[in-house]
Amino acid sequence: MKILNKYILKSFLTPFLATFLIILFVLIMQALWLQFDKIAGKGIDIVIIFKFLGYIALMMIPTALPIAILLSSIMALGNLAENYEFAAIKSAGISLQRLIRPLVILMIVLSSLNFLFLNYIFPYASLKSKNLIYNMKMKEPGLALVAGTFNTEIPGYSIKFKEKYGPENNFLKDVLIYEIKSNSVNNKVITAEKGEIVSEEGSRYLTLVLENGFYNEEIINKKSTRKQREKVPAIKAHFDRYKINIDVSSIGNFDPDDVKYKSGKEMLSLNQLQYYVDSLDEPFHKFVENRAIRTYKILRGNKLVKDTTISKYNLKTDILNNFNDEDKSSIINNATTFVSSNLDNISSFKETLMNKQKIINAYDTEYHKRLAFSVACLVLFFIGSPLGSIIRKGGFGLPMIMAIIIFVIYFFISTLGKNMAESNTISPFLGGWLASIVLLPFGVFLMIRATKDKGIFNVDTFMQPITNFFNKIFKIDNNKS
């Protein structure tokens, strides 16, 4: 049996190492391509680029591992079945479950390694890579500007715009700029309908060319009192075209190891994720409870008609008949305003509640997704190994196609579960484990079919009724002729 165990392990490990390296290389190149515009032509040292690729490789290992396991298990068992070795092993009284037992032990080890990667190395690599990307973008500050938020990374300015567009993403829409001088207030405001980022490689200046906007500035003396500042002169002007040259030489030489972001859910270990969920969950429930009590008190305290009055009339008498027309109009208007105000408050509260819940769910889902992705090595192996013995094909042809299809399905279900959990449609636990829950029964089904030496489905079961139907038709036609 030791010889058989060594043989099956060798049959699996040979394609596994090759497929793992190939898949990891493809994933690294895909990630590099997505970040290529932030790196190319920025004068970044080659050592920093290789450091970035190293972080990306560490991040991609937990993803490459399950794919490689799925593909190599199909290939290994497919080769054994294609060369009739599997049939010979079965004839010796060795079942499929006994044959893959050493591989199952290996999968447990690989799942444990994947768990350690996802818990320790993946968060570290995510932290370093995201901050390195940001620091490399600051080598070209125009690329660091993000739409829909105030950008304060450029010294002396706070810049916000609605949209970034154009072939090089250097055109801005609905621009708002605050010039922030040292030890001063935001006394200079510039708005523009659109703008353009002009930055030449090697230049110490970032140029913003604004069109069709307004320039507002209050001339404030630092020694002025508060009352004097209320009467300070101001400059306001409309411009068709306005150019701002910003000195960015101070941020051109960046520190690649500088850490600015460190609380993203991908950057946290499982313990840290659990801590974040617990620390956010208690204030969230207290917020809901306080808001509910407040709403209840408002509704109780602002009743236009007290419960005793309603009880007195037993809801049989129209209360408005007890008032004159002028008072009726006033009561109806007040009631309408009161109801409308409370509906607006409830609507606003609902949106705030959903946003807070979404943040908690995002961290909680990431926690369960990490655990589920560790177990994915086992789940995909129990799909790949019986599938390989069923299709009886080795090599990179059909097994590669089957592996891609299965992993795409796994990834799609996993993403669907994550999105549903974050939107509070399902629980974070179910969202994180949804792909494994869906595909595990399919693996059990394949294992049963492979043990019984049957295909995925019986073709005759589907073809026989069709064949009988056409036989009847042709028989009738022959009788007529």
Image: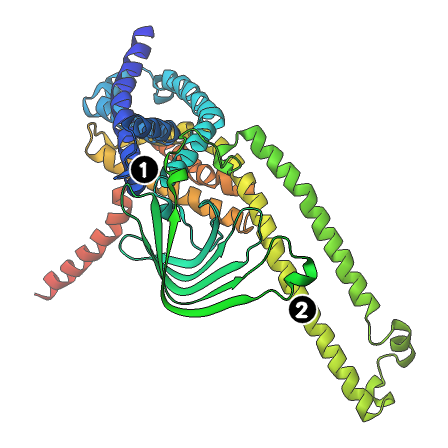
- Residue 31: assigned label: 1
Q: Quadrant of the N terminus?
A: top left
The way the protein has been coloured in the rendering is: rainbow
Instruction: Give me the residue at 39% from left, 62% from top.
Output: 173
Of 304 and 33, nearer the camera is 33
Q: Quadrant of the C terminus?
A: bottom left
For label 2, the residue is 343
Q: Is residue 125 above or below residue 462?
A: above
Q: Is residue 223 above or below residue 453?
A: below
At which x and y percent is residue 87? 24, 21
Is label 1 in a helix, a strand or a loop?
helix
Q: Quadrant of residue 322 in the image?
A: bottom right
**Residue at the farthest top position:** 2
Q: CA distance from mark 1 to mark 2?
A: 46 Å
At which x and y percent is residue 332? 75, 83
Single out the mark in the foreground, 1 or 2.
Answer: 1
Q: Quadrant of residue 34 in the image?
A: top left
Q: Is residue 5 above or below residue 355?
A: above
Of 367 and 57, nearer the camera is 57
Q: Is residue 314 left or right of residue 404?
A: right
Say whether disc 1 or disc 2 marks the residue closer to the N-terminus: 1
